[in-house]
Image (spheres, rainbow, N blue to C red):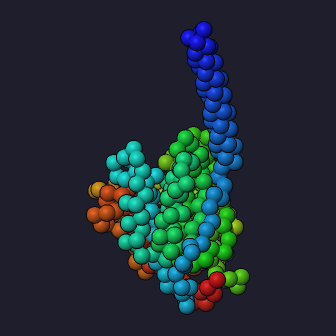
């Protein structure tokens, strides 16, 4: 009799565990489906502004914005030169600290879905910089897009959806610094690999209101692997470029292509160079490009 009762208890216990496993499996499937749908909705709405944040201890505002240092850097999803399977944002973060720039445009910034650690927000906080991020597209590992880091408070943020295709989505992030009387517009972008599409993207950018008034800095990974209509249009519009040879930035270990560029209007490019350090040659497949700019007299915005 006792053994029969024990057998019954075991059967009932086993049944309860089976029910709990089934219930847990259903909940996990529902959670996975909800997450999949959330990512689909995000992907359908891209590009979108994903982050705007000020550091807890910002740099003191500069007394003048007339001369400043800018940089552009494709961080290659934080995977380093060899595209390692596990991202390591600290490598690129060390390079960012080496640049000592007032404004830094970043491309291929990855913000993972999993975990509470946001690499771009963490790096901005560590460097005491303001940050804005625009997600260009969403894939299984997270949001991928452009960012701007700045020592100055960011007054406005805009996202620009560039012409392209479903297979190759591209965008630009436009931010403005200064006051209502005058401002500096900084546009960070990552253009297409295809000449024809890149030309359309350049035409769109050059006609956009964010590039139509005041001092404008257009910088990013232009994918200018050869001279084309798009690059000629950029060089024609931004005539204040110093007309020196563009520094090669790709591949980082032995650069031969000038993919990454900095254009300026309403400001003079005083210096332009690739940031070639041991850390920079390992942290990404692109080298950063750094420029010192000087605004035209009378064009200096009042600091925010």
Asked if 251 appears above or below 55 in the picture, the reply is: above
Q: Is residue 243 left or right of residue 215?
A: left
Q: Nearer the viewer, residue 40 or 70?
A: 40
State the image quarter where residue 22 is shown: top right
Q: Is residue 120 left or right of residue 171?
A: left
Task: Give x and y (percent) for residue 282.
Answer: 32, 57
Residue 228 seen anywhere in this rendered image of the structure: no
Q: Residue reaching furthest right?
A: 180
Task: Give x and y (percent) for residue 264.
Answer: 53, 73
Asked if 281 appears above or below 2 in the picture, the reply is: below
Residue at the spot x=66%, y=75% of the render? 155
Residue at the spot x=61%, y=90% of the render? 298
Residue at the spot x=51%, y=53% of the render? 110
Q: Quadrant of the N terminus?
A: top right
Residue at the spot x=61%, y=42% of the render? 165
Asked if 47 appears above or below 147 in the picture, the reply is: above
Residue 145 seen anywhere in this rendered image of the structure: yes
Task: Give x and y (percent) for residue 210.
Answer: 66, 68
State the image quarter where residue 60 is shown: bottom right
Task: Give x and y (percent) for residue 258.
Answer: 39, 60
State the image quarter where residue 51 is shown: bottom right
Q: Nearer the viewer, residue 35 or 213?
A: 35
Q: Quadrant of the C terminus?
A: bottom right
Q: How many marks?
A: 0
Q: Residue reaching furthest front?
A: 1
């Amino acid at each position: 009799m006792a053994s029969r009762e024990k057998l019954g208890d075991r059967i009932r216990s086993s049944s309860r565990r089976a029910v709990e496993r089934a219930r847990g499996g259903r909940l996990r499937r529902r959670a996975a489906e909800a997450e999949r749908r959330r990512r689909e909705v995000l992907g359908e709405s891209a590009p979108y502004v994903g982050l705007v944040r000020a550091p807890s201890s910002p740099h003191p505002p500069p007394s003048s914005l007339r001369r400043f240092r800018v940089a552009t850097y494709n961080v290659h999803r934080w995977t380093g030169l060899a595209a390692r399977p596990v991202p390591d944002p600290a490598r690129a973060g060390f390079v960012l600290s080496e640049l000592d720039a007032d404004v830094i445009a970043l491309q291929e910034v990855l913000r993972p879905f999993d975990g509470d650690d946001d690499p771009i927000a963490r790096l901005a906080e560590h460097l005491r910089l303001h940050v804005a991020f625009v997600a260009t597209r969403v894939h299984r590992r997270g949001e991928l897009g452009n960012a701007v880091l700045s020592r100055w408070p960011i007054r406005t943020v805009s996202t620009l959806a560039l012409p392209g295709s479903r297979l190759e989505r591209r965008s630009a992030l436009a931010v403005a610094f200064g006051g209502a009387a005058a401002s500096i517009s900084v546009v960070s972008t990552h253009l297409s690999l295809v000449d024809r599409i890149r030309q359309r993207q350049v035409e769109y950018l050059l006609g956009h209101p964010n590039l139509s008034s005041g001092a404008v800095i257009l910088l990013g990974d232009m994918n200018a692997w050869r001279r084309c209509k798009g690059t000629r249009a950029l060089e024609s519009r931004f005539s204040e470029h110093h007309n020196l040879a563009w520094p090669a930035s790709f591949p980082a270990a032995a650069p031969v292509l000038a993919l990454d560029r900095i254009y300026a209007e309403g400001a003079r490019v005083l210096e332009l160079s690739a940031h070639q350090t041991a850390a920079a040659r390992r942290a990404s497949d692109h080298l950063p490009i750094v420029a010192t700019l000087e605004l035209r007299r009378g064009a200096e915005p009042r600091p925010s």
